[in-house]
Amino acid sequence: MTESISVCCPACRREHLYTAPSFPCACGASVSPALDRHGTATAVTHDVRAEDWMSLRCTACGRRDEWPYPELGCPCGTVLRVPVTGGSAAAAGVTEAPGAAGPRQQRPRFPPVAIRTARDAVTAAALYLRRLGYRDIRRADQRPPSGVGLAARGLLAQVDPTVRPASLRDVECLWLTAMTESAGCVYFSLAGYAGDARARADDLGVPLFVLDLTGTAQPVNSLADELDGGTLR
C-alpha cells in the first residue's frame, strides 16, 4: 500500500494530504517512492523540462527505472515538489502476470494519474506507453521546442502540458526528430491540436492523443485509435 504524508505549501501555508503515486515496473509489480515525512516541500519555479527524474528500484525484481519526482499543485497556484528519501521504492504487489509485455499482447491495467501539474501529464503519458507495452521509457535525448520529450525503444513521444493547442510546427518537429532516429512517434497534448496540426499529423502518420484531467489518453485521430487498439506497429 502506498503511503501518505502531510505537505505544507511554503507560499500560503496550506496543509495537503499527499499520497505517493504508484508506477508500473516491467515485471508487473507496482513501485512507489518513499516519501520523506521530515522533509520540506519546495516550490517548483523552473521549466519542467529541466527537472531531474528520480531512479526507483523495484524490490520484487531489482530493476531500476526513472520516473518523475512527485509534485502537488496548491490552490494558491504554487507547484510543490514533494520530498522523497533516497532513490529506492517499495514493491506494492503484482497487478498483472510478469512477462505480459508488448503492444499486441494482454495489457496490464494501471490506474491513471490525475493531472494537476505538468509533471503529472508526463507521468500519465509514460504510464499509457507502459500499458501499450513499451519499456525502458526515459527522457528523450533531444528536447522538443515545447513540452517534454520521452523515448522508448523505436518510439519518440512528445508531451505538451501547456494550455495552448499543439501547433503544426510542433507536430512537424516531432516527426522530423523521429525520422532522424528511425523511430515512430506519438503526441500527447492537454489542450488539443490546431486544425492544420491535425491534418498534417494524418499526412505524416503521427498518432495524436489528448490527456484529460483524470490522466486518461483519448485518441484524436484514426492513427491513435489504431495504436490504442494494438493494430499499429
Image: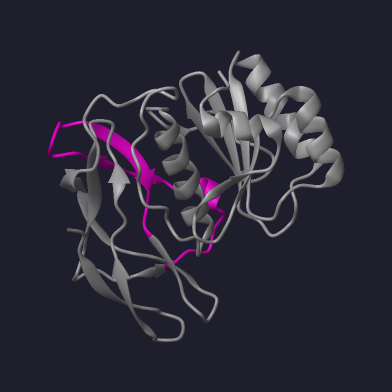
Q: Quadrant of the N terminus?
A: bottom left
Quadrant in which residue 171 is drawn: top right
Residue 217 coordinates in the image, percent (x, y)? 55, 47
Residue 140 coordinates in the image, percent (x, y)? 52, 31
Quadrant in which residue 182 is drawn: top right
Residue 51 coordinates in the image, percent (x, y)? 46, 49
**Vertical side of 59 occupied by 72: above or below:** below
Q: Is residue 152 left or right of residue 146?
A: left
User: Which residue occupies the foreground of this view, 37 or 3?
Assistant: 3
**Number of marks:** 0
User: Which residue occupies the foreground of this view, 175 or 199?
Assistant: 199
Residue at point 64%, 22% (across, down) = 178
Q: How is the image coloured?
A: one colour
Residue at point 74%, 38% (across, down) = 170
Residue at point 72%, 23% (across, down) = 176
Is residue 107 magenta-colored? no
Q: Quadrant of the C terminus?
A: top right
Magenta stretch in the rendered image: 43-70
Residue 111 coordinates in the image, percent (x, y)? 37, 52
Residue at point 31%, 70% (across, down) = 18
The residue lying furthest to the top in this view is 182
**Vertical side of 102 occupied by 211: above or below:** below
Quadrant in which residue 202 is drawn: top right
User: Which residue occupies the foreground of this view, 171 or 207?
Assistant: 207
